[in-house]
Amino acid sequence: MFLLLCFILITIFLIFRLSKCWRKSSPQFRLPPGPKGLPLIGNLHQFDPLKPHICLAKLGKIYGPISSLRLGNVPFIVVQSAKIAKEILQTQDLNFCSRPSTAGAQRLSYNGLDMAFNPYNEYSKEMRKLCSVHLFSSKQVHSFSPIREDEVSKMMHKVSSLSHASQIINLSELLMSYTSSNISRIAFGKSYGDDDESERRRFNRLLNEAQAMFVAFFFSDYFPSIGCLDKLTGQASRLEKTFKELDGFYEEIIKDHLHATNPKSQEEDLVDILLRLMKERSFTFDLTLDNIKAVLMDVIVAGTDTSAALVVWVMTELIKNPNVMRKVQEELRNAARNKGYITENDLTNLEYFKAVVKETFRIHPGTPLLVVRETQKKCTIEGYDILPGTLVFVNVWAIGRDPESWRDPEIFKPERFLGSSIDFKGQDFELIPFGAGRRICPGMLLGLANSELALANLLFSFDWELPDGVTKEDIDTDTLPGITMHKKNSLCLQARKFSGSV
């Protein structure tokens, strides 16, 4: 009955808009090719929200590297080649660097006060300056080295005790615990590790719920005229509950910093920096507590998930490719032969290790679809007309597997990067896991530092094996739904402490 009511309401409100939709698709515009949609819902029935990157990649095989579709009442284009990604993210970046207003992102970002989801305007420029200069500069990232090293050391002790007891290690859980504790210490000076189980569960629950809200279906996103249906489905109340819980979490953190009685450590955490900047009033806008909460949302959601996912995907590919595992371990162990651990300075010249990371970004990017963009004015791409207000998916997952850019794209082969100048910092559009242009991820340096140090020490200190009865063919690469591409089934391995010579 509820579905029937929804259909009737959709029909009543949207039938009058069909003529407008048809006019936009008339011959006077040369739109990119794409599948024909149905009245009212467009191509929603052909779109898989659980694995959108795979769904859109299949679309690309039929319609080419740029295609169009309509989800409900909203026009989209899909970009799936390095050449067109460069056009979108560099050549015409100014026209494509804004963000649409979606229900989940708007509410959780305090109406676009964050870094990732705000529309492109003077405010977004100032926020980017704030982040690049004060929060995520190379100097600032380096200042957090003691926290990283301490958290990696704790993780190594945990793995060592589990390996000594011959226990199977759930690497997926281990790395989420490491990254959440690491990021929480960097962001607000408090660890949510194993010593505080209830707070750790709360932190992880809020993180998971925020991720779910970013990809949840809201009628208001696709059928603005009947956004009221989100109240009937319960999505609006779920979103509001999540927002209030997160807001309360941020309030506690900020209150602790404003009324701290214990002496501070020498280095500031991110909340300290933001509160100091709020007092200094050094920006063209007044930095408020809501601005600080919105930035915290970005740091917690993006910083925790993507760092853990990268290391899990590297270990997944290495356990499936033991020859690669041996080569990267040999390089790491030669680099720190007499120290017993890997430091950040050791990582600088590890060519094969860096190649392994790049190859993992290519085949398992943390965010398979870059955060959706919105065109600001009419333009032309590859001879096709793109109208204002069109949303843009850049399918990084498909670009990393494009045979036009990569030989044997489905094979995990780090050697392809040896002697290659291709990097992932936004200039080589065959490999853009962090995006490019004005909206490139501002936390890239921090995320890399957190991931690489943990990964290097796991590989340096331990030899990794599959549990008894499990073969490498049993290790799947299925993914969970969400902005970040997590492995669906946890990666569970056994570790043996390395004590021999290389």
Image (cartoon, rainbow, N blue to C red):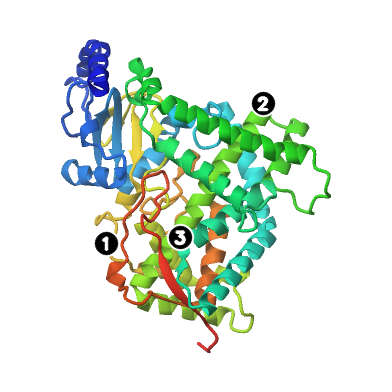
Task: Tell me which residue sits at (41%, 30%) in the image.
Answer: 95
Q: Nearer the viewer, residue 69 or 186?
A: 186
Image x and y of residue 68, in percent? 24, 33
State how far apart marks 2 and 3 are (Cα).
41 Å
Within-10-Å neighbours for mark 1: few <14, some 14–19, many 20+: few
Instruction: Report the residue marked by disc 3.
Output: 172
Label annotation for residue 285 = 2
Three-letter code, disc 1: Glu
Q: Nearer the viewer, residue 413 or 471?
A: 471
Instruction: Report if the CB atoms under discs 1 and 2 are less than 8 Å apart.
Output: no
Image x and y of residue 113, in percent? 57, 30
Q: Secondary structure at mark 3?
A: helix
Question: Which image quarter: residue 279?
Answer: top right
Task: Tell me which residue sits at (54%, 31%) in the image.
Answer: 243
Instruction: Report the residue marked by disc 1.
Output: 410
Within-10-Å neighbours for mark 3: few <14, some 14–19, many 20+: many
State how far apart marks 1 and 2 are (Cα).
48 Å
Image x and y of residue 405, in percent? 29, 56
Tell me if residue 73 comes above or below residue 471 in the rendering: above
Within-10-Å neighbours for mark 2: few <14, some 14–19, many 20+: few
